Amino acid sequence: MVRTDNLSKHFPDAKKGTVKAVDGVSFEAHNGEVFGLLGVNGAGKTTVLRMLSTVIKPTSGSATVAGFDVMSEPKKVRASIGFMSTSTALYGRLTAREMITYFGGLYGLNGSSLKSRVDFVIDRLEIGEFADRLCDKLSTGQKQRVSIARTILHDPPVLFFDEPTAGLDVVSSQTVMEFIEEVRGEGKTVIFSTHIMSEVERLCDRVGIIHNGKLKAMGTVSDFKASTGQPTLEKAFLEIVEFEKNRKAETLR
Amino acid sequence: MNPIVQVFRKEIQEILRDKRVRSAAILTPVIVVFLMISLFGVIASSVGGKTKQKVYAVQSSSPLMAQLKKNPRLDVQEVTTEAQGESLIRKGDARVVLSIGPENADHQTAVRLLFDPKEDFAEMIKQIVKAGFQPYSESVGNRILGDHGLTRQQIEPVTYVDVPVKVGEGNGAGGMIVSLLPYLMVLFTFTGGFSIAADMVAGEKDKSTLETLLISPVDRTQIVLGKFLAVLCVCGSSAISSVLALYLANVLHIPGSEAMFAGGFGLSGKAILATAICLLPLAAFFAGLLIAVSSYARNSREAQTYLGIVNLLVIIPAVFSQVLGFTDLGSKNWINFVPVLSTAANMRAAFQGKENWVGVAEAACVAAVLGVVMLRLAIHLFNREQVLARV
């Protein structure tokens, strides 16, 4: 389970003073649920995920991941999560197997338990054919599968996906989405950040719409359509983030 | 397994598979050492008189001409006139042209030496010519003194006797290798690490692998330590590679090596110990510095720019260490507190068989303190949020 309470992150900026990248975001994501963070580029989705994965510290507010506080128990939080994004790369001069084994070691696996987990994920994600090939030599789809293997190797209860299909072709995207559906079935908590409406409609049980660092709305896709009276998620999203109002204000300026 | 060891092993595994690093850290020292020995060896042979220098002389019947032709260090070519000689100098074909005048009634002969003052080598040829005429000059001078009932001892109030004194326990090396070896070892210790530093942290930012690493439950300090040890290892390998190259050059007798190793190789047990004590903390200082720069930089391109500046800070004292022998600075205690220079100065003394253990300890302590400072700085920079994306 993941819970955030008034989570904020402010960055100092030489030109703008202070930038509120995330401003008072609160939500809960439960076991066996895919919770979507939907927003345009720069809305604050990645910053939320970075705070939840303890890479950066919140300016204010609190958050727990798998029952551990991100501020006081960062190591336990990191041990409980798997993180994947399209920009997440592999070490080009390691083979797929070496890459997975390396991260298994960093997550505290060793000896026979490490070997059996590595064999398990290689088998589950059908990596065997290219497991001993250097990551630099793999295709985009193969790299994506190795990335997924690295993410789930230590069997974390919480998984973060930060725009995991951006830049991928249809086939590779399909692999990622099928995988997310599988892990939901295993009872894991998934936070899925994206700006692609079709992916949200297919995967997310509930969604939080983030805009300019603020959580504008939270609910199911049907809730958004109903509350805005719009026929599609895309139109509902634009209404929620006050796209038209903002555009007119921009024009007047 | 300890996470520091895991990170270290992974870095070394990647480094060994990187052609650029293999060539920069291991192969380059060997190639550069071989080239430098050949080049410096040729220069040393020229300066030391092992190769003949071409000199031009206007045709003359003077006995000095015969004397000149007998000089084993000179290859004498004749020209018909001074003008022809001048023309050769202007065209760059001749460095020195002699015009030997007739002997006068007082048994004096005027020798005109035509040369291009901008040519450094002309000065050396002039010295060889003058040294070659010295026996003739002394012989004629002795005869004139004899005619007046005098001897040379009577007119020379000061006489000189060279008495070499053995310093230090070992034989020690001498000559150019003593200047070159510490310089090369210090330089390659740095350049070895330099070749991988940008990839270590800044490169991971570029490739987006850093975030994955930071999300693992390993402490950031442990990650830095693993990377630090990997850079340290490459710095050390590069230095060892340069010593092995020198050893091979000596054993294989590559061209120029005879002149370079004329005074011996200088690597006694004590010299190796002193070198290790000096060089290891210096390598730690370099590794810490390189990791700190790589952690601070936004990307590997920015890291390369900063590393270029740092490179200069290392090269300048390293180059200066080569000319320490021409100053008395090597004996000054404050040198031991100047990083890089202190290591080179103490290694130089060790290769000469004149180990100064207090100086070695001081140089090692200074480098170790700087190494700790740089490592702490690297850890501090790596633990900041901005390590991922500096704004």
Image (spheres, coloured by chain):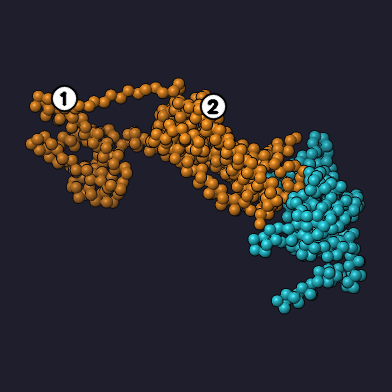
Taking depth in this image into account, of B70 and B104 the one nearest to the observer is: B104
User: Which amino acid type is shown beneath numbered disc 2?
Assistant: Leu
Residue at point 70%, 76% (across, down): A253
Would you place residue B85 above or below residue A224 in this image? above
Whole-angstrom CA distance, mark 2 to mark 1, is 54 Å
Kindly indicate which chain is depicted in orange in the rendered structure. Answer: B
Q: Residue at x 24, y 51 (%)?
A: B87
What is the quadrant of the C terminus of chain B in the image? bottom right
Residue at coordinates 86% horizontally, 47% vertically from top-left? A67
Residue under the image location 63 percent in, 53 percent down: B299
Residue, disc 1? B154
Near-viewer residue (B10 or A71) = A71
Vertical placement of residue A194 versus A228, above or below:
above
Q: Is residue A129 left or right of residue B141?
A: right
Which residue is tagged 2? B273
Q: Chain of mark 1?
A: B
Q: Classify mark 2: helix, strand or loop.
A: helix
Chain A, hue in figure: cyan
Between B209 and A2, the one nearer to me in the picture: A2
Around disc 1, counting alpha carbons within 10 Å, would you say few (fewer than 14), some (14 to 19), or many (20 or more)?
A: few
Determine the chain carrying the residue at label 2: B
Residue B232 vs A48, above or below: the answer is above
Q: Where does the image place residue B334, in percent across and percent down from the top left?
A: 47, 35
- Image location (x, y in percent) of residue A167: 75, 60
| Amino acid type, residue under disc 1 in the picture | Gln
Which image quadrant: the N terminus of chain B? top right
The secondary element bearing badge 1 is classed as helix
- Along the polypeptide, which appears first: circle 2 or circle 1? 1
